[in-house]
Image (cartoon, rainbow, N blue to C red):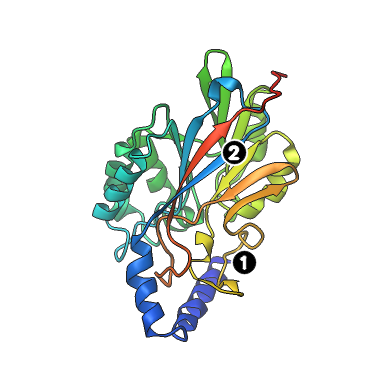
């Protein structure tokens, strides 16, 4: 799917929402987008050293700063909400902006600098970041002091124990280099891969090295209808659109995102901050 095809799909989705009815439109436009869900998920990772048992990792995704919904005031409120969860680490899985990057650089820096995990915040880029200006978004990441894990590995240590937060650059725009990640990734320690597009799990899981993939991109479909499910899903989000999956023995989680694409509404699909509590296996062996 090309960018033009994606925009056309979004246009069809906007037209489709007019058939839902005024009450649902009002709810989807003004009510549900304001109610951020704090989703708590406990995951047992087979390679997690007991030194990291109970580790709290927060994922946020698809901020989509724009001129209509995700203002500076709104993103600052959301970052305060993230800090209230007292994270050990934070993962941001791409799409910082929607259709323009430069006007939002300073606001992104201001918001990201507010994040206060015990260890580190790491981030990757998404398709919208490349569609706008990847250089600006990368500069905002670096100015914020956030770890850039695009095709890279960031390792957190507890003594000799290691937890690896890895990432690939955007897959849709073909900037991903899993080979570079694998070259940099030590053999020991649990490894978590940030990949913006969730369906990339079919490929990353084949490496046999990642305990968990964290993704966004889908927004959960934004509008989920009973017996129908998500009305529209973007390229590479058809198979794993929302929540937790197991793919070839690897856990994969798709976050519904904080921002929105057109149409800017949510029904039965609230914005999400995911709080992962990581657990070590009972039979852990350092191999």
Q: Residue 225 or 165: which is nearer the viewer?
A: 225
For residue 80, above or below residue 287:
below
Query: Could one spot residue 21 in this view of the protein?
Result: yes
Local crowd size for mark 1, using a 10 Å CA cut-off: few (<14), some (14–19), many (≥20):
few
The residue identified by callout 2 is 43
* Residue at mark 1 to residue at mark 2: CA–CA distance: 33 Å
**Secondary structure of the residue carrying numbered label 1:** loop
Residue 180: which quarter of the image? top right
Q: Which quarter shows the C terminus?
A: top right
Q: Residue at x 50, y 60 (%)?
A: 219
Q: How many marks?
A: 2
What residue sits 51% from the left and 40% below the top? 276
Kindly identify which numbered label has been placed on residue 178.
none
Badge 2 crowding class, 10 Å Cα cut-off, few under 14, some 14 to 19, many 20 or more, is some
Q: Earlier in the sequence, mark 1 or mark 2?
A: 1
Name the side, left or right, on which 132 lies relative to 42. left
218 sits to left or right of 134: right
Determine whether, in the image, residue 5 is placed left or right of residue 11.
Answer: right
User: Residue tagged by mark 1?
Assistant: 1
Whether residue 195 appears in this view of the structure is: no
Q: Position of residue 275 (x, y in %)?
A: 47, 42
Horizontal arrangement in the rendering, residue 37 relative to residue 8 (left or right): left
Residue 35 place in picture, x, y as percent: 36, 59
Mark 1 touches mark 2? (CB < 8 Å): no
Give how far across and how far down residue 107 sits, in percent. 27, 48
- At 50% across and 51% down in the image, what residue appears? 126
Q: Position of residue 203 (x, y in %)?
A: 71, 47
In the picture, the quarter occupied by the N terminus is bottom right
Secondary structure beneath label 2: strand
């Amino acid at each position: 799917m090309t960018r033009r095809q994606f925009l056309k799909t979004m246009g069809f989705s906007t037209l489709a929402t007019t058939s839902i009815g005024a009450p649902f439109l009002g709810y989807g436009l003004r009510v549900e987008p304001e109610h951020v869900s704090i989703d708590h998920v406990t995951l047992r990772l087979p390679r997690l050293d007991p030194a990291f048992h109970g580790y709290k990792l927060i994922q946020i995704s698809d901020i989509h700063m724009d001129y209509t919904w995700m203002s500076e005031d709104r993103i600052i409120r959301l970052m305060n909400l993230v800090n209230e969860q007292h994270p050990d680490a934070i993962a941001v899985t791409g799409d910082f902006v929607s259709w323009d990057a430069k006007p939002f650089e300073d606001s992104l820096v201001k918001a990201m600098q507010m994040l206060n995990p015990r260890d580190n915040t790491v981030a990757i880029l998404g398709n919208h970041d490349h569609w706008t200006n990847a250089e600006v978004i990368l500069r905002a990441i670096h100015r914020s002091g956030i770890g850039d894990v695009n095709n890279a590995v960031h390792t957190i240590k507890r003594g000799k124990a290691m937890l690896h937060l890895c990432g690939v650059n955007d897959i849709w725009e073909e900037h991903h280099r899993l080979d570079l990640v694998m070259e940099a990734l030590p053999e020991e320690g649990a490894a978590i891969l940030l990949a913006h597009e969730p369906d990339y799990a079919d490929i990353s899981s084949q490496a046999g090295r990642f305990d968990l993939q964290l993704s966004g991109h889908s927004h959960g479909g934004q509008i989920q209808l009973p017996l129908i499910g998500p009305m529209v899903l973007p390229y590479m989000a058809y198979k794993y659109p929302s929540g937790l999956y197991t793919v070839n023995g690897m856990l994969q989680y798709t976050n519904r995102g904080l921002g929105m694409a057109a149409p800017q509404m949510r029904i039965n699909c609230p914005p999400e901050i995911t709080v992962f509590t990581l657990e070590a296996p009972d039979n852990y062996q350092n191999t």
